[in-house]
Structure formats: C-alpha cells, structure tokens
Image (cartoon, grey):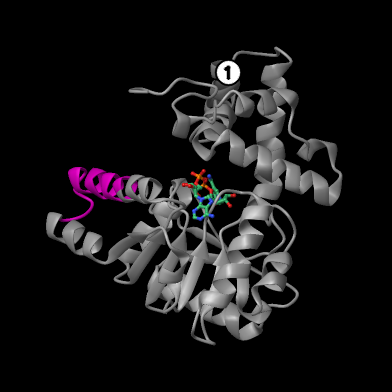
Amino acid sequence: MERVGVIGGGLMGSGIIEVSARAGLDVIGIEISDEAAQAASQRVEGSLRRAESRGKIETTEVEAVLERIRFESDLEALADRDLVIEAASEDETIKLDLFRRVGEILTSDEAILASNTSSIPIVKLGAVSGRADRVMGVHFFNPAPVMALVELIPSLTTSPETLDRMRGWVGDSLGKQPIDATDRAGFVVNSLLVPYLLSAIRMYEAGYASATDIDQGMVLGCGHPMGPLALSDLIGLDTIKAIGESMYAEFKEPLYSPPPLLGRMVDAGLMGKKSGHGFYPYEGR
Ligand code: NAD
C-alpha cells in the first residue's frame, strides 16, 4: 500500500502523514479547508525541521519527504489511494460522514479504510462505508513519529486479510510495533490510561494537591516520563473528554465519566498544549 491518504492534519494526522512519507510512501493529507490544510502542512514541516535541527534527519531527506506529501481540502483527491487513515476530530458524526463519503470515493476494491479513533466503534464506521470487510482501526500514539506502538483493531466485520495487510504495512513499511486489540471503546492502552488521567483531574478538581505536585508525584514516585496532567495537556483535553464519554457510554463505568472541570476547561477553549493553555500555560502562546 504505497498511495496513502490521511484525513485530518491535527496532532495525530500530521504525525501519521510524516511517518508515512518518511517511510517512502506517497501521501495526500486532507483537511477541512484550505487554511486548515496550510496549517497542517506547516505542522508537518515544523516537525521535520525540528528533527533536522536535532540531527535526526538529513536536510536532503527533509526535502524528499516534503515532496512526497500533498495537502488537499477535497475528499475526492483520495480516489486513487490504496489506504486511507482517518484522523479527524474524535466526533462520531464527523467520522460516520467521512466513512460514508470516502467509502464511495475510493476506486480500488482492495483499498483499506482505517480510523485512528481512540474510542468510536469501528464496526459502526465499517457499516456506513459500503466496504465493512476492508475497514478497521489503526491507533497510533502521540507523537506518531516517535512512538513505536500501533494498536490494530479489526471489528466483527473486518476480514482476516485486511488485518494481515495492515499488520504488514505497520510493521514492514513503517517499522512500528503492532499489537492487536478488540473493538471495545478505549482498546488496550486507553482503557488503562484514560481512567488514570481522569482520576488525576478529579484529584486536582477536589483540591488534593496542586497540578505540579500531582505530576511530580507520578514522575518521581513511579518513574513515569511525565505526570498525568502534563500528559493530558499533551493529548488534548477535548480528545480526552471525548474518549471518556465514549468509554462511559459503552461500559457505564463511573471512572470513565469526565469530571465537570474537564468539561468547563474544554468549553473555555483550554485544550492543553495545542491551544496554548491547559493545566499549564505553554510558551509563545
Ligand atoms: P486534533 O484536534 O489535533 O486534529 C483533528 C483535525 O481534524 C483538525 O485539524 C480538524 O480540522 C480536522 N478535521 C475535523 N473534521 C474534518 C473533516 N471532516 N475532514 C478533514 N479534517 C477534519 O485531534 P487529534 O489529537 O489529532 O485526534 C485525531 C484523532 O486521533 C481522534 O480520533 C483522536 O481520538 C485520535 N487520537 C488522538 C491521540 C492524541 O494523543 N491526541 C492519540 C491517538 C489517537
């Protein structure tokens, strides 16, 4: 699968675009408007330039990678793709609409349509796509160019062949490490991670300790590379709220229910690092 499309060029989409182009693949990134496509293009280039300044990639290679990427705002541009990975906002209505439309646009019967969703049922995305056997979840981690893990999520209707092809693509083309998960909201990693992050937010909301003390506690006491509130800011508070809501809707487990403070912060536009402010302020914003 050498012609790849990525829908959404935010935090995750831009990373998946970069990873795919660095693997030598031809990539089209789709955003909601020309302005958003421009911003996504800058996000990818910024990440590559940072890698270049750290000596992780040669200047000539950066140019070559950028040449393999094209940004568009029209889904029709995806018609000739072998693989499309949807990484748009964590919103079921948006994703269902995209799967319905892209399922019709793809011309190849072999083409696979995958979602980077963290919690929306894959089976629902397959059902509206008209190609349910070639739809599955492929869940990258943030930042995608750095993190080795990819969760592979076949739904009840995904064919074994689709899963095998995606496993080969993730392992052989991208050089990442896949693990298999079932089509349950949260899959493996978020089922464990999200209740932990929501518990930290509840703890902060209840005034147990300051944000820095909660984070220091987990960094110095448990050897985590960053604390839960800093990690929440990195993931995006809107994304965590949406994942918690989907997990709560599926399991009715109170630990998955987003606390009121998280909702208020999202309503206020405090989305974390990507908006310049979350539990912490971020430089330059
Ligand atoms: P984000 O808010 O950074 O980016 C989402 C992007 O999708 C935005 O740029 C938006 O303009 C675009 N978009 C929205 N509707 C669109 C449409 N109809 N067509 C094209 N583009 C559209 O969000 P993100 O963190 O990149 O998350 C994207 C997906 O990845 C979500 O499903 C999320 O659950 C999942 N995910 C997120 C993380 C994380 O750590 N943030 C990790 C793994 C998976």
Q: Quadrant of the C terminus?
A: top left
Residue 265 in magenta stretch:
no
Residue lying furthest right: 252
Residue 43 in magenta stretch:
yes
Image: magenta residue range: 42-58
Judge whether 108 appears above or below 260 on screen: below
Query: Residue 224, how many percent across, how many down?
Result: 53, 35
Query: Residue 15, how many percent across, how many down?
Result: 40, 53
Q: Chief secondary structure of the magenta span? A: helix
Judge whether 224 appears above or below 57 on screen: above
Kindly identify the residue that appears in the image at 33 percent across and 72 percent down. Answer: 25
Q: Quadrant of the N terminus?
A: bottom left
Query: Residue 157, how many percent across, how many down?
Result: 73, 78
Left or right: residue 167 versus residue 71 is right
Kindly identify the residue that appears in the image at 65 percent across and 13 percent down. Answer: 209
**Kind of residue sitting beneath label 1:** Ala
Q: Is residue 236 visible?
A: yes
Mark 1 highlights which residue? 211
Judge whether 62 appears above or below 4 on screen: above
| Quarter location, residue 129 | bottom right
Question: Foreground: 165 or 54?
Answer: 165
Left or right: residue 153 versus residue 178 is right
